[in-house]
Image: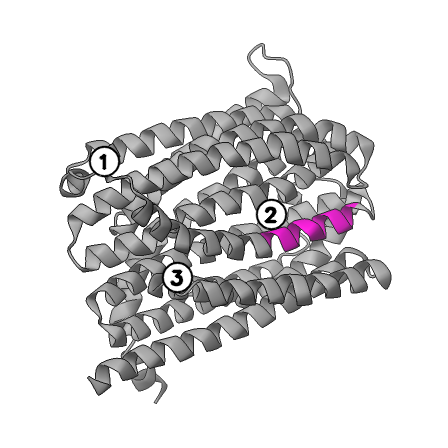
């Protein structure tokens, strides 16, 4: 019975995984940059610098996901036009996306420089943590510009099904970032130790190189010759730019609502103490890695959903989407088991401070429980994005994280005094609500599309 039930999804498991695995690794690369920063600083600089990295990452992750969300507006449009074999439109969309993302990158940098750096003084954080955080935040702010250029060409290539190249660039970029980060933070080869600023410089250099290499790959590869014939300044117009922003802006808001909730949680925990904040950084870094991997499965689901939507093959769309749910449930079940079983050992990767490790171990158990909710909600967002349904999911994410999750977290963690654990209980509640509502939305939408074909 079970075998017969799952057999109809069998053809989609292999195709989805083939597309998803490189995207998963590529998405993981974005988080590994910050993970590497945390590990390097935690071991070579100490607990206060690690808390500074935690504070900066909690702020910068909001900025980064706004940019990434805007860039994701290109992917479903490329996937849909590719499904229709409309190559010329793909090149025109790329030109518009590059302009939009470049402008957004500059705006976000200005927002970091004139906004976040001013606000950081008034967050009730440890003065020493803030002092070390400022130069690191400024360097990450500059890095958003080349990151947005990289994302433009990455989303274009992935929308056409070319996912391995961005993966390789991300992997080698992380190796470069880690090596350079250790040299700068520790102070090797005659270079003076830079502390937290060192990982800022290594991240900036990494993202500059990644942007150049990804752009050169797309512009020079024979795979994209047919698409790039219309990649010109003349292709830039308000209609296509609005189409990209119509999807990209709500997607940016979806990611912002979730990540900003976790960032607000980091600030709540920072008011308790630097040790708790450092522990939160350790646990959230590990949870962010699995989230970004689930986000890779989500991106692959967007591409397949967009392809099937463009071909008007709505039954395959539904079967492929459900198979993506199965894949993410299997993967996140494994990561949940790892977090719970090895909760006492995993924090040692980041720090040797036993006080930090003790709190982080407790948070990893909570992270283990919300893995399934985190994975299914991000895949739900990806599937709906492929269809072009982005507005209602945006409302769902806002309600789940800011109306339900964060207030519960504040009440349990700060008001009732449960500390970092209480804040994380609230975040788990938000993820649960988001997961359920997005799945119900997918069921409603996909069944409606299938009925539409059957009635014609």
- Mark 3 or 1, closer to the camera: 1
Image x and y of residue 152, in percent: 36, 40
Front-lying residue, 9 or 265: 265
Q: Residues within 10 Å of mark 2 (few under 14, many from 20)?
A: many
Report the residue at 19% width, 35% height from top.
Answer: 221
Return the mark for residue 285.
Answer: 2
Q: Do the CB atoms of the residues marked 3 and 2 lie less than 8 Å apart? A: no
Name the residue beneath numbered marker 1: 234
Residue at the limit of the structure toward the bottom, as seen here:
1
Q: Quadrant of the N terminus?
A: bottom left
Main secondary structure found in the magenta portion: helix
As drawn, is 233 to the left or to the right of 23? left
What segment carries the magenta color? 259-270
Name the residue beneath numbered marker 3: 385
Image x and y of residue 399, in percent: 61, 66
Q: Do the CB atoms of the residues marked 3 and 1 lie less than 8 Å apart? A: no
Residue 163 in sight: no
Disc 3/disc 1 C-alpha distance (Å): 28 Å
Report the residue at 22% width, 85% height from top.
Answer: 454
Secondary element at tag 1? helix
As drawn, is 264 to the left or to the right of 227? right
């Amino acid at each position: 019975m079970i075998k017969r039930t799952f057999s109809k999804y069998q053809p989609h498991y292999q195709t989805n995984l083939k597309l998803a695995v490189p995207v998963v690794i590529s998405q993981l690369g974005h988080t590994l940059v910050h993970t590497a920063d945390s590990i390097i600083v935690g071991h070579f600089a100490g607990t206060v610098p690690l808390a500074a990295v935690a504070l900066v990452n909690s702020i910068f992750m909001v900025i980064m996901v706004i940019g990434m969300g805007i860039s994701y507006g290109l992917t479903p449009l490329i996937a849909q036009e590719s499904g229709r074999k409309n190559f010329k439109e793909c090149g025109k969309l790329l030109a518009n996306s590059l302009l939009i993302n470049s402008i957004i990158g500059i705006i976000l940098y200005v927002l970091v420089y004139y906004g976040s750096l001013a606000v950081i003084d008034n967050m009730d954080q440890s003065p020493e943590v803030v002092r070390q955080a400022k130069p690191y935040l400024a360097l990450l702010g500059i890095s958003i510009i080349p990151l947005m250029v990289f994302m433009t060409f990455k989303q274009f290539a992935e929308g056409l099904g070319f996912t391995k190249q961005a993966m390789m660039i991300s992997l080698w970029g992380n190796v470069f970032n880690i090596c350079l980060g250790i040299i700068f933070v520790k102070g090797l080869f005659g270079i003076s130790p830079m502390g937290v600023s060192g990982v800022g410089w290594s991240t900036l250099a990494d993202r500059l190189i990644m942007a150049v290499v990804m752009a050169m790959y797309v512009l020079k590869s024979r795979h994209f010759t047919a698409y790039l014939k219309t990649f010109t300044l003349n292709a830039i117009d308000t209609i296509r730019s609005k189409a990209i922003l119509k999807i990209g802006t709500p997607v940016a808001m979806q990611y912002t609502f979730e990540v900003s909730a976790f960032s607000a949680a980091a600030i709540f925990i920072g008011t308790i103490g630097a040790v708790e904040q450092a522990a939160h950084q350790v646990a959230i870094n590990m949870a962010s890695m699995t989230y970004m991997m689930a986000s890779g499965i989500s991106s692959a689901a967007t591409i397949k959903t967009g392809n099937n939507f463009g071909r008007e093959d709505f039954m395959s769309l539904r079967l492929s989407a459900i198979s993506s749910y199965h894949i993410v449930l299997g993967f996140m079940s494994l990561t949940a088991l790892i977090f719970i079983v090895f909760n006492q050992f995993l924090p040692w990767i980041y720090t040797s401070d036993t006080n930090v490790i003790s709190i982080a171990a407790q948070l990893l158990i909570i992270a283990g429980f919300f893995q399934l909710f985190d994975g299914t909600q991000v895949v739900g967002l990806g599937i709906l994005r492929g269809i072009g349904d982005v507005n209602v999911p945006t409302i769902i994410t806002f309600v789940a994280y800011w109306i339900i999750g964060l207030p519960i977290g504040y009440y349990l963690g700060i008001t009732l005094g449960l500390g970092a654990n209480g804040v994380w209980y609230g975040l788990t509640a938000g993820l649960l609500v988001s997961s359920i509502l997005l799945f119900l939305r997918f069921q409603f939408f996909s069944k409606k599309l299938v009925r539409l074909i059957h009635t014609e």
